[in-house]
Amino acid sequence: MSGRLAGKVVVITGAGSIAAGWGIGKATAVACARAGARVVAADIDAAAAAETARLVTEEGGEALAATVDVADAGSVEALAELAMARFGRVDVVHNNVGIGKVGGPLDTAIEDWDRVHRTNVTALLIAAKAFLPGMRERRSGVFLTTSSIAGWRYVGFPHLAYSVTKAAATHFTRMIAAQYAAEGIRAVTIVPGLMDTPRIRLTVARAFPDMPFEDLRAQRDAQVPMGTMGDGWDVAHAVVFLASDEARYITGTELVIDGGLSLTVSGG
Ligand SMILES: NC(=O)c1ccc[n+]([C@@H]2O[C@H](COP(=O)([O-])OP(=O)(O)OC[C@H]3O[C@@H](n4cnc5c(N)ncnc54)[C@H](O)[C@@H]3O)[C@@H](O)[C@H]2O)c1
């Protein structure tokens, strides 16, 4: 395989989609494979992971589907072992799972708060423990995290647990970057804005039950200076760059992919 990621092994979590269409992880898996990477498409939904791997192999790429719960340390250790057994190394891990629970402090149950933290933040610690040792041995690796502009600002409806965990995910990633920069390991946070992925039909639509989905979509488009939401591919292409050696001097920072949304006063 030739391409910007030739020879690299990329593990992507949340590499499926919760419904038909292209989620960020699914697009990223296909984009990385098109760039020459061997890909591990990992998802809690076995069928969704298999679908992504199938799309890659159908195009002539190399992919392994894996079932994982990123919130479970044993499951992630098994994922790392599986990737090592099949490919012998992991060069890039893209921590792409994010769950939410719509609500503010008064209507967020502590159980939900803990569950969202476990999946969005503790999972990063779990992934670090599973994947950093191999990267340290090879003195090379990339640790990518999908955050959200919700981790920076109010997004127009109360999404407290999600927002707080996305802020934490960004800082966690910076801390990895700082500690391991001298060992050849880079860590970068990807910060999408409003993206048109299958998830918004469920999560965001749930926050506005009285609004027809097409009106909601138009409202989200209208908030963005570029006039439209982004999609999974906008993130996927950025991940290909960040995972590649062309980004070798980029670490400890955030790449915002939001059509200019974060420049506005009220968007989000
Ligand atoms: N869609 C947006 O507007 C948007 C905006 C900003 C940030 N993000 C972030 O981007 C990432 C991907 O979003 P998306 O909309 O493409 O995702 P999505 O909702 O399509 O989810 C991707 C996959 O994650 C899997 N998943 C859920 N819990 C898991 C777990 N515990 N272990 C393993 N897999 C699990 C799901 O099965 C799904 O296939 C998330 O971190 C999300 O917070 C999305």
Image: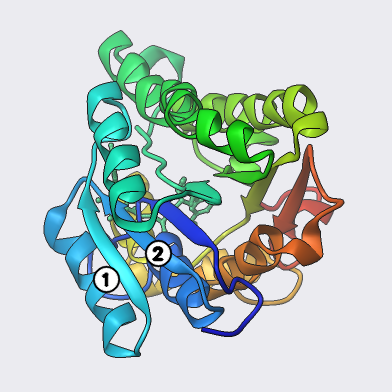
Residue at 72% of width from left, 68% of height from top? Answer: 259
The amino acid type, in three-letter code, at marker 1 is: Ala
Q: Which residue is mark 1?
A: 53
Residue at 46% of width from left, 23% of height from top? Answer: 129
Nearest the viewer among 44 and 115 is 44
Q: Is residue 224 visible?
A: yes
In this image, 165 relative to 40: left or right?
right
The amino acid type, in three-letter code, at marker 2 is: Val
Q: Residue furthest left?
A: 47
> Residue 131 in the image: x percent, y percent?
48, 34
Q: Which mark is residue 39?
A: 2
Vertical position of residue 58 compared to residue 25: above or below: below
* Badge 2 vs badge 1, beta-carbon distance below 8 Å: yes
User: Quadrant of the rendered structure where residue 213 is?
Assistant: bottom left
> Residue 48 in the image: x percent, y percent?
20, 62
Badge 1 element: helix
Nearest the viewer among 136 and 69 is 136
How far is mark 2 from mark 1, CA to CA?
8 Å
User: Quadrant of the rendered structure where residue 118 is?
Assistant: top left
Return the disc, 2 or 1, that comes first in the chain's sequence: 2
